[in-house]
Amino acid sequence: MKIANAAEDDWEILKGFFPVGWEALATEHHATKGLRQDKSPEKLLQVLLMHLGCGFSLRETATRAAQAGLSQLSDVALLKRLRKSKGWLQAMCQVLWEERGARTKSPGPVPLRMVDSTLVKEPGKTGSQWRIHYSLQWPQLKCDFFQISGTEGSGTGESLKGYPLKAGEYVIGDRGFCRGPGLHFAAACGALTLVRLNTGSVKLQNSDRSPFPLLSRLGALKKAGESREWTVWVPSGDAQPLRMRLCAVRKSVASTRRSLKKLYRKASINQRTPDPATLRYAEYVMVITTFPADKFSTTQVLHYYRFRWQIELLFKRLKQLAQLGHLPKHDEESSHAWLYGKLLIALLTDKLIAHARDFSPWGFELAAKEQPVA
């Protein structure tokens, strides 16, 4: 009796979640052009996902691919295939994102640049730790910056200073980018920024450089959903403080409870008592921005950040997947392809989870083609 190959069975199911026209996209973006053997887009994608999704090194991936009968190639040849697949992987990411429907809609006509970073520790007892700095243009999902740095020393942390910002860009980042030097750098470049307020790294000021009374101002927001904004100044060393807009909205009771639960859990792990001010801040979402007030109302600013928050889960999955495996460190094209591959897996994971909420008893969707009645 022949025993079923579970890997092959699962692969056929996984293919059902691939974006429409994924094989044609391989041809369109020349992913298989110039290959002397194993020109099948399906086999190529299987090999790439072994490397990107399972965290195998290039050499281990090549060995496993040969054992599985997928391809006969060296680790160097595999790296070349990864590089060639950059446009294909990006295109599949775009189609998967478009499939998400209403959630893909940008909050306005302004193109956005999403900045983020994540830590990666390569496998093995002596595996090195790296920080990946990257940014994606929205809605194209195009990676316009990718850099790998160490994790210790000056210039290795999250900062807008590490990105080649341009005048007129609309840049959105999480609270890790809420630092005075980076915000001042962005303003000097002419870029417009929107970041989540980090009360631990930025001390807001009034125009006369006196401390901004944040808690008393927030007290004016009495009801869930009520929002308001104030003009604040952000200091950075001896430089003239940067004028910004502080926009805040009061959370719902349920959302506040979730935030407080996280704060208490973190405090318990660190064996300390939560700061009373921090507990108060948990009742609000606060962002600071240089988006012009004549083009972006308080509500619009918060809506733009809410859009950033909607894709935060995607970034979190991308970061989790980035922990798996080796990354190209000396080849820009391969590094970009590596990021698109990780993003593709994150989007596929998101799609699988969405379908899992109402899975059928057999675990996958049936093809649209009608089957003949026996």
Image (cartoon, rainbow, N blue to C red):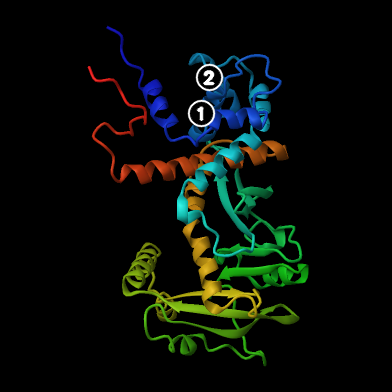
Tag 1 or tag 2, which sits nearer the N-term? Answer: 1
Q: Is residue 135 above or below residue 40?
A: below
Q: Is residue 373 above or below residue 2?
A: below
Q: Is residue 97 above or below residue 124?
A: below
Q: Secondary structure at mark 2?
A: helix
Task: Please give the residue where the numbered disc 2 appears in the rendered image.
Answer: 65
Quadrant of residue 1 within the rendered picture:
top left
In this rendering, would 192 be left or right of 40? right
Residue drawn at x 42%, y 43% is 351
* Quarter containing the C terminus: top left
- The image shows residue 286 at horizontal and vertical percentages of 50, 75
CA distance separating discs 2 and 1: 8 Å
Q: Secondary structure at mark 1?
A: helix
Q: Is residue 144 above or below residue 67?
A: below
| Residue 336 badge | none
- The image shows residue 330 at horizontal and vertical percentages of 72, 38
Task: Please give the residue where the numbered disc 1 appears in the rendered image.
Answer: 50
- The image shows residue 276 at horizontal and vertical percentages of 40, 80
In this rendering, would 218 be left or right of 268? right
